[in-house]
Image (tube, rainbow, N blue to C red):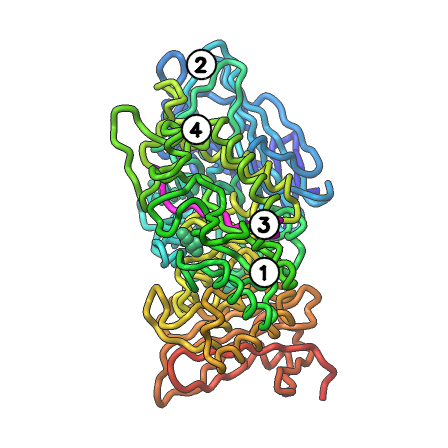
Amino acid sequence: MSIVYTSESRTFTLSGGNTSYVLHIDDMGNLLGIYWGSRIPDGALKHDPAPYFSISSDEFYTTHTPWEIPTPGRGYYSDASLVVVNAGGDDTADLKYVSHTITPGKPGLEGLPATYTEEDGEAQTLTIKLHDDLTGITVEALYTMFEQSGALARSLRVVNEGSDTVSIEKIMSASTLLRGADWDIVHLKGAWARERNVIRNPLGEAEYALGSRRGASSQEENPFIALCEKSADEFKGEVYAMSLIYSGSFLATADVDNRENSRLSIGLNPDVFGWMLKPGESFQSPESVQVYSADGFNGMSQIYHTLYRKRLARGVWRDMVRPILINNWEGTYFDFNEEKILEIAKSAKELGIELFVLDDGWFGKRNIDNCSLGDWYCNMEKLPNGISGLSDRIHSMGMMFGLWFEPEMISPDSDLYRAHPDWCLHIEGRSRSEARWQLTLDMGREDVQEYLIDVLTREMRNGKLDYVKWDMNRNMAEAFSVMLEPECRFETQHRYILGLYRVLDTLVERFPNILFECCASGGGRFDPGMTYYMPQTWTSDDTDAVERLYIQYGTSFVYPASTMGAHVSAVPNHQTGRMTSMRMRGDVAIGGNFGFELDLSKMSEEDTKTARELVEQVKGIREITQKGTFTRLVSPFNGKQVAAWQFISEDESEALLCFYRILGKPNTAPDIVRMKGLDPNAYYTDDEGNIWSGAVLMGHGMWFTTRGDYQSKIVHLKKTEKA
Ligand code: DGJ
């Protein structure tokens, strides 16, 4: 059983995989979090006096108490996780245990993306009900322990059972006190075209806060935070991580107190959030997923990968290998017509590509990015047979057809804006801040949601679409909806995300066979919230092979390869100006959902030959890359100009070793890469017929001799009888 209640000690032991999480209800009915770490027997830990050991009982309400849901105002001075201002004007809440239930499986969260179970035995859910007598606030704390992996999904639901409206000012989905202060902190920081760099710093005796206020999870930070032992690396050492299933503004903090306790939290960003909760109403926080690993960062990532691939992503595409695609964006930008598109499609078909994606520029009068967002009807000058006619032609070539949209946006120069100038986020009396000449629709409005559902349904049907790229190219400004009363305007950002989720849920359900790919100027919303609706995301607008090594390496900390869109583009690369070979570009893109993004009809004969080989190769290995176990082996962030990772197939009969040398070096030994997780007693053949012992590949490693910059090698290993 994953969750056990021990009545003598009033403890809940939640165990799964190699981890346990223990909660305790003290004599006064307070809910305390007393343990998170390696697995311990059920009920074995009864109480943890460590944080407030020397404190006399009348000083009990101190900042050192391991509150599970710390609230301010009663002697707790660290980061509160729930701040609710009541009718009395104070933000104090005295939450006391009322009851609990332990149920099989996992309930969904209303209006929000969340992990799920397919069979009850996969997980158990503990719901603890707490109540504040003075205000009538009830909190339901939800904990789902996944039996096999030990991933712990958490969220809070606040119900106003009082008679006055209260204001939720802050709500963290998870907050946990860890013993010790000697941690390193790890997070994924970036920028447009430089997403998800792995940042590791000593936590020190301080508070570390990271997040987004942009209305999107963002390129700048990812909704993920981890603490690890100083000695932890990719393969060993303890790691404690939290990831938030949410696509909007978030906050993650790590806070060290003066008794060497560290609190790790993640949730909605209170700087841009507020919620007025009337009597009888409830508020559901997003879900956080926390993962403990004793096997370093790869151990952590593998738990996230399995959960997010199999029990967060949904729909028919979840378990199907993804088609190899050609996207015309970097090939043509806005400069195309039907003839050009068909020419690229023909070349794509000849290479064995399976899906054609028409990107930005097919609608309204959009020949440049300063107009037409919102006018989702075909530009018949460019495409005289309409989207439907083009779709028929692509389909008759034997390829699938996909289309780009940026539904959440509106150009001031658009028919939609002329008809509905009030539909965008704005503040009356102030100018509207444009970015890329566009404004953001107020997705919290029901009329906007209905309009988008109708228009997109029409276009998806009319275009007989097999694939949709859902883009979003700016962050919010003036995010205070005019539809809301002034005291509710801090609800705007969260209402936007809920509205977006509603639109996505409706469309995904209506078009179960469409493969949706999330995009936000590249990886600006690469988050678990989006994975629930769209099983893949365009990883970055940076398609340079070298840059992609860093981006894909960092992204893999939380997200499986099956979520990462990875394309081969033209050289000199459009973002960096770098020249790399078609082989190197392909070998990097193999690490994600493979595609091309260039004018195939203009490629040299040699590149065409390599591209054809790549397509063939990807078809032979994508079961492994999209469903296998991924392990990072050598980090490009260590400055040694080498990166390596591997995949092992689900049935463990095949493996892929992916090696990349960035800049060449003279007079050095070959690079040796040691593999992980192979069968030490088995033998494997490589593509050249060499036979390798699994034990040798892991103990000694495989060696690579390269000459020159930007070299790569993919070795496909298959289990074999000993020679
Ligand atoms: C940003 C995306 O990341 C690109 O791939 C492309 O779709 C452009 N938007 C189109 O405007």
Mark with earlier residue (4, 2): 4
Secondary element at image label 2? loop
Report crowding for label 4: few under 14, some 14 to 19, many 20 or more residues within 10 A (C-alpha): many
Amino acid carrying label 3: it is: Ser
Residue 41: x and y, percent? 65, 46
Amino acid carrying label 1: it is: Leu
Magenta range: 463-476
Residue shown at 41% from the left, 27% from the top: 491
Query: Which residue has dot 1 on it?
Result: 355
- The answer to whether residue 521 of the structure is visible from this angle is yes
Tell which residue pokes out farthest to the left in this image: 430
Report crowding for label 2: few under 14, some 14 to 19, many 20 or more residues within 10 A (C-alpha): some
Real-space CA distance between mark 2 and mark 3, rounded to the nearest whole angstrom: 51 Å
Amino acid carrying label 4: it is: Leu
Q: Nearer the viewer, residue 265 or 259?
A: 265
Residue 201: x and y, percent? 34, 56
Mark with earlier residue (1, 4): 4
Query: Which residue has dot 4 on it?
Result: 82
Q: Nearer the viewer, mark 2 or mark 3?
A: 3
Q: Nearer the viewer, mark 4 or mark 2?
A: 2
Do the residues bearing badges 1 and 3 touch, measured as CB atoms within 8 Å?
A: no
Quadrant where the N terminus is found in the figure: top right
Residue 584 part of the magenta-drawn span: no
Q: Nearer the viewer, mark 1 or mark 2?
A: 1
Residue shown at 65% from the left, 63% from the top: 398
Q: Nearer the viewer, mark 3 or mark 4?
A: 3
Q: How many marks?
A: 4
Q: Nearer the viewer, residue 51 or 349?
A: 349
Amino acid carrying label 2: it is: Thr
Quadrant where the C terminus is found in the figure: bottom right
Mark with earlier residue (1, 3): 1
Do the residues bearing badges 4 and 2 touch, measured as CB atoms within 8 Å?
A: no
